[in-house]
Amino acid sequence: MSYNDRRRFIKLGLASSAALAAGCTDAPKAHTSTTGPDRTKGPLILSTWKHGLAANATAWEVMRTGGTVLDAVEQGVAAVESDLTNRSVGLGGMPDRDGHVTLDACIQDHDGRAGAVAFVQRFEHPIRIARAVMERTPHVMLVGAGAERWAEENGFSRRDVEIPEVKAKWLEWLEKAEYRPVVNIENHDTIGMVAMDASGRLAGSCTTSGMAFKIHGRVGDSPIIGAGLFVDGEAGAACATGVGELVIRTAGSHTVVELMRQGMEPTEACKEAVRRIIRQNKDMQDKQVGFLAIRADGAFGGWSVYDGFDFALRTNDREELVPTGHDRKWVG
Ligand code: SD4
């Protein structure tokens, strides 16, 4: 999705929110809780947004050629991190208010092992650093200068990227925007991926440049285990996209997995996590949040606040972009 498409997405949300009746629910086309969940025995990969198609293709190839599901979720999203035309993931992402692109990522495996980095600058692959944190340290999360120093000491090289279009957007924003903590100037397009291999093992990853024009130092849900991502091989895996603050406050991905553990279908679990967010926030104007989930038995689904959230699906016989069900519809 291009920067302009994303702006349109936000504007549509703004324009339509006044017309939205609370509780107005559109019947989802691809995932209906009434007809039961989609299900596959695996391999299965779900990724957020259109860029998920390329990520899934990479991840699929990794598994096809003998890589683990953890390798697949790492390399799948790493492919998107390398795409400098992507304005919401990796070094091509939009900067914060001070003009710095700061990156967040996390990864988790079937057994709940996890690694994360947040607020790191000038590294092409935060997801690879996150995996290294998981595998080479006793910790789960490193942030900021400490994470950067550790990454350099552990073989990750800095990369400087300057993209004139991004700089121009930032300068434009500085001129026009009021300096206040507007949560949702840009609110989506993180890549989150959850996957299952042929033997039923799960893994997930999430990586983002976060919200455009955020306050320097702000970290969203994406690198936080339980918020932007949660994997528990016994129950399932979930990831989130959208306004990170809302997802953190509800421990969103953890909520989805715990609901699936209690037997809920993945689409219903995602829907309930979205509805908790809606119940907690009177003003959902221009705030999109979406979840994707795979249950341990291979059932999968997704749900979002507004329409417009598509996920990339890859199975043995499907490779497509699927719209999630949603609570609210744009009418403007
Ligand atoms: C964040 N969740 O930093 C991220 C933003 C995003 O899709 O782009 N999500 O809050």
Image: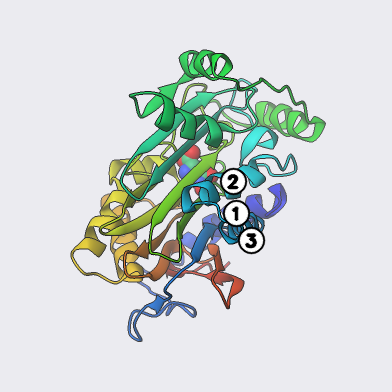
Q: CA distance from mark 2 to mark 3?
A: 13 Å
Residue receiving disc 2: 75
Residue kind at label 3, given as amino acid type? Leu
Kindly indicate the quadrant of the structure image that contains residue 201.
Answer: bottom left
In the image, 155: left or right of 250? Answer: right
In the image, 156: left or right of 71? Answer: right
Mark closer to the observer (2, 3): 2
Residue kind at label 2, given as amino acid type? Gln
**Mark closer to the chain start, 1 or 3:** 3
Q: Is residue 222 above or below residue 136?
A: below
Residue lying furthest front: 66
Mark 3 crowdedness (10 Å alpha carbons): few <14, some 14-19, many ≥20: many
Residue receiving disc 1: 62
Q: Is residue 50 above or below residue 7?
A: below
Mark 1 element type: helix
Q: Nearer the viewer, residue 53 or 255?
A: 53
Q: Quadrant of the N terminus?
A: bottom right
Residue lying furthest bottom: 35
Q: Residue placed at 29% from the left, 41% from the top?
A: 249
Mark 3 element type: helix
In the image, 102: left or right of 260? Answer: right
Please say which color scheme the image uses.
Answer: rainbow
Picture coordinates of residue 296, whole percent (x, y): 32, 64
Mark 2 element type: helix
Mark closer to the observer (1, 2): 1
Q: CA distance from mark 1 to mark 3?
A: 14 Å
Q: Nearer the viewer, residue 34 or 299?
A: 299
Residue receiving disc 3: 53
Kindly indicate the quadrant of the structure image that contains residue 322.
Answer: bottom right
**Could you tell me if residue 242 is visible in this image?**
no
Do tag 1 and tag 2 residues touch (Cβ < 8 Å)? yes
Q: Nearer the viewer, residue 174 or 83?
A: 83
